[in-house]
């Protein structure tokens, strides 16, 4: 199993690198105006490719029912390893990722950012969280995966794949980290650390409570982090200044045009 895992990781890394070089070649040839931006955002683009590849691979395994043995093994290990005394903490972690907490919090922060003149950050957070909610609804309807039943657990609506709590929390946390980095660059590491701890706590809580399979939360975390990065790049490109017009070239072409 360890060898298969290492082989899959190496394969995913090669695919991500190949896609990045193919994208770079395309941009340099077809969209040279974006070349500087691509070089500047190289890490973000590579991260996007890795997240997308992992989410697609995990989703494919889930649809083809190939992840069952690993899912059962990991979920049973989590159930046996986490002491009952921590159940309150994990219930609180799950609660922090519920719609009744996240959506009012998102609205309040978006309104505050908007009135503070931070429209980029407000739009980034709003689109990321709303998009995350839509993606959860669509994927649950399409995949329709049965939830775990390895022990008695609370009933939750909808299918198991993906974990809605994990996906939307990851989208919120990633968007908030980007916003903090733009507003207070010196607090980037702290924001990133808090985001990772929050997402991991919510993801683990869904396993501890028996609400999801491990692949549900892994794919959800990847998709949730993917959304704000894509939205951020799209907003950057949308608001990027247009390349200056070469007036000299226009002046030189004018006389020949009159002839």
Image (cartoon, rainbow, N blue to C red):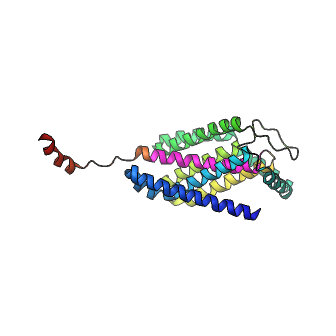
Expressed as whole percent of the image width and height from the top left, the position of residue 210 reads: 81, 47
**What kind of secondary structure does the magenta stretch mostly adopt?**
helix
Residue at (40, 49) in percent of width and height: 30
Q: Quadrant where the C terminus lies?
A: top left
Expressed as whole percent of the image width and height from the top left, the position of residue 128 reads: 57, 42
Please give left or right for residue 240 compared with residue 74 in the image: left
Expressed as whole percent of the image width and height from the top left, the position of residue 250 reads: 20, 46
Nearer the observer, 242 or 179: 242
Please give left or right for residue 159 compared with residue 253 in the image: right
Q: Quadrant where the N terminus lies?
A: bottom right
Nearer the observer, 37 or 189: 37
Please give left or right for residue 183 compared with residue 157 in the image: left
The stretch drawn in magenta includes residue 212: yes
Residue extending farthest right: 152
Please give left or right for residue 69 compared with residue 202 in the image: right
Which quarter of the figure has residue 13?
bottom right
Nearer the observer, 130 or 24: 24
Which range of residues does the magenta coloring cover? 211-236
The stretch drawn in magenta includes residue 37: no
- Is residue 202 at least partly visible in the picture? no
Residue at (47, 56) in percent of width and height: 41
Q: Is residue 185 above or below residue 226?
A: below
């Amino acid at each position: 199993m360890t060898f298969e895992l290492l082989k899959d990781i190496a394969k995913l890394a090669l695919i991500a690198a190949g896609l990045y070089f193919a994208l770079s070649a395309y941009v340099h040839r077809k969209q040279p105006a974006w070349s500087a931006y691509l070089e500047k955002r190289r890490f973000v683009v590579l991260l996007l490719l890795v997240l997308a590849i992992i989410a697609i691979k995990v989703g494919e395994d889930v649809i083809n029912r190939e992840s069952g043995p690993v899912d059962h093994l990991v979920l049973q290990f989590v159930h046996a390893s986490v002491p009952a005394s921590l159940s309150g903490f994990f219930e609180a972690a799950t609660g922090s990722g519920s719609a009744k907490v996240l959506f009012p919090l998102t609205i309040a922060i978006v309104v505050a950012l908007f009135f503070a003149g931070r429209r980029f950050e407000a739009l980034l957070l709003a689109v990321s969280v709303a998009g995350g909610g839509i993606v959860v609804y669509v994927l649950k309807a399409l995949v329709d995966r049965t939830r775990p039943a390895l022990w008695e657990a609370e009933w939750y609506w909808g299918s198991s794949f993906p974990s809605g709590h994990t996906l939307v929390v990851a989208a919120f946390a990633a968007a908030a980290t980007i916003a903090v980095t733009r507003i207070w660059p010196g607090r980037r590491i702290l924001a990133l650390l808090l985001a990772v701890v929050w997402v991991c706590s919510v993801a683990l809580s869904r396993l501890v409570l028996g609400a999801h399979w491990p692949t549900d939360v892994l794919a959800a975390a990847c998709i949730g982090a993917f959304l704000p990065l894509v939205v951020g790049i799209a907003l950057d490109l949308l608001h990027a200044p247009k390349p200056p017009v070469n007036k000299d070239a226009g002046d030189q072409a004018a006389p020949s045009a009159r002839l």
